Image (spheres, rainbow, N blue to C red):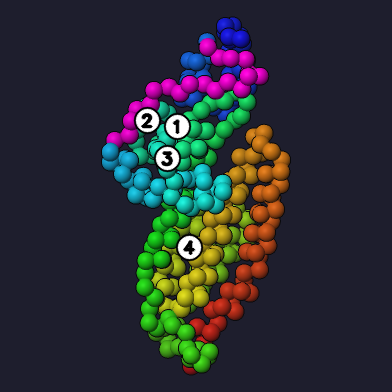
Amino acid sequence: MLVKSSTAAIRVSASFPHFNHARKNQFDTCMHNFLNPSDGAILPAMPRKPFPESVQTEVLVRCRRRCALCFCLDQDLDEKEGQLAHIDAPEDATLGNAAWLCTKHHARYDSVSLQTKGYRPSELREYQQILFASVESFERRGSKKRSPAGKRNVGGKRPVVALEVYDRRLPIYQTTMQFVREVVSDLRPELKLIMRFFADTDQALFLYDDSIAGYLDELFKKALRLHTVDLMRTSMRTDDREPDNFMALVKEQTALASWFIDQHAEIRARFAPFLRMP
C-alpha cells in the first residue's frame, strides 16, 4: 500500500525521532513510494558524493581495512572486504564523515528500515575512534623491540635498581594507579582518558620487561572494551533490540568492573620488584 497522505507521512516520521536532519530528508523524499510498514520495506538510498582518493587512503591506512562495527560489536579485528560508508550526510565527502565497513554492516548502515532503528551516526563515529585507537596501540607496541634490560633474570630474582632508573620507572607506576582509580570512579572511562594512559605509558617498553608491558596492554584493551560496552548499553536503552543482548552486555560490564576494582593490589604486586631501592 502506498503512503499518499501527508498526515500519514508526518505520523511515520514522528515515530523516528532519532533520525538526524539529513536522514529525515532522505526519509521524506521517499515517502511517496513507501510500502506498508508491516512489509518491512527498506528505503532506497539517496545519491552519495564519492570520497576523494586522499580521504579513502587515510581511512584505509588508519583502520587497516578493519570494520568498526565488527570490532566493537563482535570484537572481530580481522581484515574485511567492504567499502567506505558516509557516516552521516551523503553529500559530505570529508574525512570526518568516512568509515570503512564490511559488506554486511555497510548494507545495514546505508539502509533505512521501517522496522528497525539501525545504527546511529554518533554511534558509528565513536566505534570508529575506538577502532583507530586499538589499531594504533597494537601496531605501536607490537612493532617495538624490547630493551635488553627488560629481560628476565635466570635466577628468578630481580636486583635492586639505581636511583636514576627508579626515577624513570616510578611515573609509569603512578600513572597506572591513577588510571585505574579514574576508571573505577564511575566505570565509564572516556576515550580521551584511555588514549592518554596509552601515551603516558608508552616508554614502559624500554623500562620494564615483557610482563609489565603486556599487563599495561591488558589494562588498555579492557578499558577500551568497558568504554565500548557502556556505549552499546546506552544505545540499547533507546532501541528495541533483543533483551538477551542487553543482559549479556550488563554481565560483561559487571565482569569488567569487578576486574578493574581488583587491580590496585595487582599493580602493586607487579611493579614492586622493579622499584626496590638499594
Depth check, front residue: 274 or 215: 215
Q: Nearer the viewer's eye, disc 4 or disc 2?
A: 2
Position of 53 compared to 19: left or right?
left
Q: Residue at x 37, y 69 (%)?
A: 144
Asked if residue 160 shows in the view, the reply is no
Spot occupied by residue 17 in the image (x, y as percentages of width and height): 59, 25
Q: Does the residue at mark 3 contact the one at mark 2 (Cβ under 8 Å)? A: no
Gap in angstroms between the C-alphas marked 2 and 1: 8 Å
Specify few, some or many for label 1: CA neighbours under 10 Å numbering under 14, 14-19, or 20 or more: many
Depth check, front residue: 81 or 139: 81
Residue type beneath disc 3:
Gly
The part of the chain drawn in magenta is: 33-52
Magenta span contains residue 185: no
Depth check, front residue: 171 or 210: 210
Mark 3 or mark 2: whose residue is earlier in sequence: 3
Residue type beneath disc 1:
Asp
Q: Dot 1 corresponds to which residue?
A: 88
Gap in angstroms between the C-alphas marked 4 and 3: 32 Å
Mark 1 or mark 4: whose residue is earlier in sequence: 1
Residue type beneath disc 2:
Asp
Q: Dot 2 corresponds to which residue?
A: 92
Q: Does the residue at mark 1 contact the one at mark 3 (Cβ under 8 Å)? A: no
Gap in angstroms between the C-alphas marked 4 and 2: 33 Å
Specify few, some or many for label 3: CA neighbours under 10 Å numbering under 14, 14-19, or 20 or more: some
Q: Residue furthest top?
A: 5
- The tag on residue 268 is none
Residue type beneath disc 4:
Phe
Q: Dot 3 corresponds to which residue?
A: 82
Mark 4 or mark 2: whose residue is earlier in sequence: 2
Specify few, some or many for label 2: CA neighbours under 10 Å numbering under 14, 14-19, or 20 or more: some
Q: Residue at x 65, y 54 (%)?
A: 253
